[in-house]
Amino acid sequence: MIDYACRDGEGIHSGRELITLRLHKIMPPCTMVQGGFLVGILDFLFPKRCCGCGRIGGYFCEECRGTIRFVRPDEAVCPVCQRFAVDGKTHANCSSKDTLDGLTSFFHYDRVVRGAVKTLKYRFVSDLAKEFVSLVPASLLRRVPVGRRKARVIPIPLHSSRARARGFNQAAVLGSLVAGRLHLSVRTDILYRTKHTVPQADTRSRHARLQNMANVFALREGKPAIRNRSFIVFDDVVTTGATLNEAASALKRAGARWVWGVTMAH
Ligand SMILES: [Zn+2]
Ligand SMILES: [Zn+2]
């Protein structure tokens, strides 16, 4: 068994991912589809490990899959105060003209979900991202109140230097998959990060966190159409809501009408 991560011009990939990328370059795509044996070889060389318990066989073993806790309707929270809110809609008295209109999170940030998020953060594993998003039940997706809005999904961007070092943005990978399931388009060309931020967990007080996040996002030059449009800002995990609220604030200052937050976990 070989289990290593390799770094090249395409960023950091697991051995499995790297071999797949290489094979895609030298073989026509139809070979990959028909060549089930290649997948077999990959599974042998780079076995998929469960994100929860490490067992070989798949990213989500039967047992760990059974422990996943979906966010129940009575656990939906307001993205500003983190207290219960009907349908995740921002409380009237928490809301200002720059805040998120609401928030939908799919999973609790427990063991197997946390394992999946962390694996995706440090190693780009596209088949893991697909399996992870496919675990979101349709009933939970329907809680994102897009209705007939043609909302655009904006994954929270990384700072460009971090994106360069890592080679991918896990929020963009997951966000595109979620957008696909919601039949919405993704825009990664609207928002960018103006500065590096200290990871949220390292900034203790609420005040420090807000300071850390102030004006962290800006809109790209040329102002793509934002006025009176609807958006979904997407991130893998929400803790304080500060990141998503800052992204919403940048969009709303530019005239966005409606901005909803969506995350895999909270
Ligand atoms: Zn497991
Ligand atoms: Zn509130």
Image: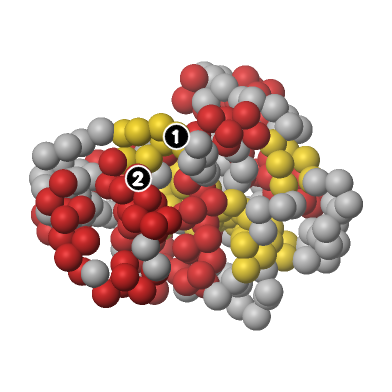
Q: State the SS at label 2.
A: helix
Q: In the rendered structure, are the residues bearing label 1 and label 2 in contact, judged by CB atoms less than 8 Å apart? A: yes
With 80 as the anchor, is 219 left or right in this view? right
Name which residue type carries label 1: Asp
Q: Nearer the viewer, residue 148 or 183?
A: 183
Dot 1 or dot 2: first in sequence order is: 1
Task: Please report the residue visible at 61 percent of the width from the left and 78 percent of the height from the top.
Answer: 147
Residue carrying label 2 = 18
**Mark 1–mark 2 distance (CA, rounded to whole Å):** 9 Å
Q: Position of residue 56 (x, y in %)?
A: 11, 48
Task: Please report the residue visible at 49 percent of the width from the left and 20 percent of the height from the top.
Answer: 202
The vertical placement of 66 against 81, above or below, is: below
Q: Nearer the viewer, residue 259 or 206?
A: 259
Residue carrying label 1 = 8
Task: Please report the residue visible at 74 percent of the width from the left and 52 percent of the height from the top.
Answer: 190
Q: Position of residue 217 (x, y in %)?
A: 72, 38
Specify the label residue 57 is tagged with.
none
Q: Quadrant of residue 157?
A: top right
Q: Position of residue 124 (x, y in %)?
A: 40, 44
